[in-house]
Amino acid sequence: MQTTRRTLLKAAASITLVGLGSKTASAQSGTFNQKVATNVANTHPIYARLKEACDKIKTESDGKVNISVFPNGQLGSDTDMLSQVRSGGIDYLTCPGVVLANLVPMASLNSVGFAFSDYPTVWKAMDGGTGAVIRSAIVKSNLLVMDKVWDNGFREITSYKPITQASDLAGLKIRVPVSPILLSIFKSLGSSPTPINFNELYSALQTKVVEAQENPLALINNSKLYEVQKNCALTGHVWDGYWFLASKRIFEGMPAPLQEIVTRNFNAAAVLQRADSEKLAISLQQDLATKGLTFNKPSTDSFRKALQQAGFYAEWKAKFGDEAWAALEAATGRLA
């Protein structure tokens, strides 16, 4: 018997209807079996706090809300998972701001170069006006976003030669992710930023296709970049977080008391994960030093001055708009 296109379409439709039917039946019975996806490994503090929150949600909801955690990008690439949470294929997602910014440009507001000097300034901004501006932009993209953003850490620069001031970046071939604002930062500092897939970064550094890279310490450690780079400048040039997103349709389909339980527990977990992340950064620096990575802490003055002279802050102020920029500077002090 020959399989026709019509037969395949009918089969696919029946599978889809079965999936939707089971989800609808679950909701009608008063129970909600859901998924939260993340790209971090199951050894990361984000995973640990997600799992802990899901266990609390199940207990407090008397088993009515059962959320399973899928780490390591099991449910797709960052872009795939973002698309899935918008369509309702995934219920919840932790999404890095640099990824979300490709859909919601305002999500890179916190990635303005050398805006944040420390964590207290970050949380003043992200729990205050800056975070409010970004969240209001996110909800316009058919997404629900939690109040508390999770921590991905400050981005630092590793290189073959020490970097102590902005002039050391002139002409430097540095790998950056595909992020307009990160490319803009390093172009403004006179570098030659080069987008390279992360899975190719180690070999690119090893063969000196690029001379430097920038990432949070956790990623530098997990990817063993200390084997091919011996200097780390703690520039903290950008802070990035993970936004906790939810499918608007699915979340609003739950009764209000269950929504409250979910929201409260995930927001509380984010605050706990922030503390975990700060402690981890300190221990990672000590660990990486024993593995041969030499650290230095440059003053940010020369970097900020170089960005100002290159027109970086003026350019991004115009892109984000006066209202958003004022919210950022309310926490950071004047940038442009």
Image: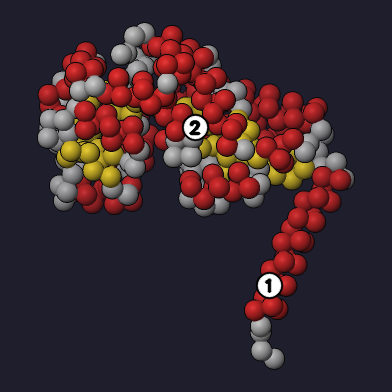
Where is residue 148? Give x, y as percent.
57, 23
Q: Is residue 66 or residue 258 the one in the foreground?
A: 258
Q: Residue furthest bottom?
A: 1
- Crowd rating for badge 1 (residues with CA inside 10 Å; few <14, some 14–19, many 20+): few
Q: Amino acid at mark 2?
A: Tyr
The three-letter code of the residue at mark 1 reads Leu
- The mark found on residue 297 in the picture is none
Q: Residue at x 16, y 26 (%)?
A: 163
Of the numbered discs 1 and 2, the one sitting upstream in the chain is 1
Q: What's the colour scheme?
A: secondary structure
The percent coordinates of residue 210 (x first, y second) are 18, 44
Q: Is residue 36 visible in the rendered structure shown here?
A: no
Residue where numbered disc 1 is placed: 9
Quarter location, residue 118: top left
Element under disc 1: helix
Pinpoint residue 247: horizontal percent, then vertical percent: 65, 40
292 versus 205 height, above or below: above
Kindly report the distance in space between the C-alpha atoms of the residues bearing marks 1 and 2.
Answer: 38 Å
Q: Is 36 left, or right, of 159 in this rendering?
A: right
Residue 188 visible in rendering: yes
Pointer 1 with pointer 2, Cβ within 8 A = no
Quadrant containing the C terminus in the rendered view:
top left
- Give the position of the N terminus as an image quadrant: bottom right
**Left or right of residue 242, residue 200 in this image:** left
Q: Nearer the viewer, mark 1 or mark 2?
A: 1
Residue at 23% x, 43% y: name it: 194
299 left or right of 268 in image? left
Give the crowd class for mark 2: few <14, some 14-19, many >=20 residues within 10 Å: many
Q: Which mark is residue 242?
A: 2
Q: Is residue 251 above or below residue 281?
A: below
